Image (tube, rainbow, N blue to C red):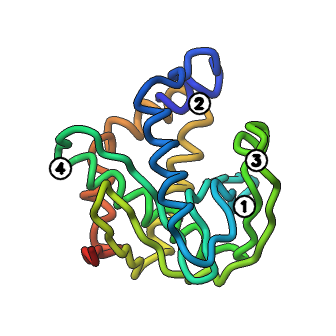
Amino acid sequence: MQIKMFTEHPDRRPKPNGNTFFGESFQRKVANQTPNLIGEEMRGTFVRDGIAINFSNDIVTRNSIIEVKSINREVEDWYLQSSILQCAVYSALLQKTNGRLVTSTFFESQGNPSVSTVVNPRIDYFLRFGDNMYKVVVNNPNRIVDFILEKAKSCLDWESAKRFDAQYKQREYQVLSSCFYCIQVK
């Protein structure tokens, strides 16, 4: 329902705050230290059944993609799980595309250069969670993509959004956890 609300009322989206700026600064620091950098905030687009799903990858290199989460306080397990799930979803969506990535419009509008690349759709996907690094491996991209398509279709009207939330809200990690695994590498 939140996606539906923000789609109809974009003015209600949360405004950038101190945590947002801290996160952007941390991502830039990580990007500057990452070898073989191609670009930041690179958008992929998955299309099926007349629905386009855009997803923005924080850091793209020749050999990997890294989602970055800054940690400036103690966090609960659900935040790590949500971040891992985000990586699994983006990796699954990328596996179902041609690997074409372009600089996200919002990032380009901030004065960053436009970059376009094609990566291996099965590229290694990592989560940089504060000082820790995790590799997220998707073993059932079809199930994840089908779930995300169901979610996207549910966002088209209020009643289906309400039904989807009743069934899945705060359970998405649990529902999809058999479709991926995560290994801490640092």
| SS class, disc 1 | strand
In the displayed structure, 63 sits above or below 3; it is below
- Nearer the observer, disc 4 or disc 2? 4
Of label 1 and label 4, which has the lower sequence position? 1
Residue 21 image position (x, y, % from top left): 49, 33
* Pointer 4 or 3: first along the chain: 4
What's the distance in space between the residues labelled 4 and 2, CA to CA?
31 Å
Amino acid type at image mark 1 = Val
CA gap, disc 1 to disc 2?
Answer: 19 Å
Count of marks, rendered view: 4
Left or right: where does residue 11 sit relative to residue 169? right
Looking at the image, which is closer to me, 183 or 175? Answer: 183
Q: Which residue is mark 1?
A: 47
The residue to which callout 4 is attached is 77
Report the amino acid beneath label 3. Asn
| Nearest to viewer (mark 1 / mark 2) | 1
Circle nearer the viewer, 4 or 3: 3
Q: Secondary structure at mark 3?
A: loop
Label whose residue precedes the other's in the sequence (4 or 2) = 4
Reading the image, the residue beneath label 2 is: 157
Residue shown at 45%/48% (left/top)?
Answer: 26
Quadrant placement of the C terminus = bottom left
Q: What is the quadrant of residue 128 in the picture?
A: bottom left
Note whether 174 is above or below 186 in the view shown. Answer: above
Q: Is residue 130 left or right of residue 8?
A: left
Quick one: label 4, few (<14), some, or many (20+) residues within 10 Å? few
Q: CA distance from mark 4 to mark 3?
A: 33 Å
Amino acid type at image mark 4:
Asp
| Residue 112 - label | 3
Q: Residue at x 27, y 55 (%)?
A: 81
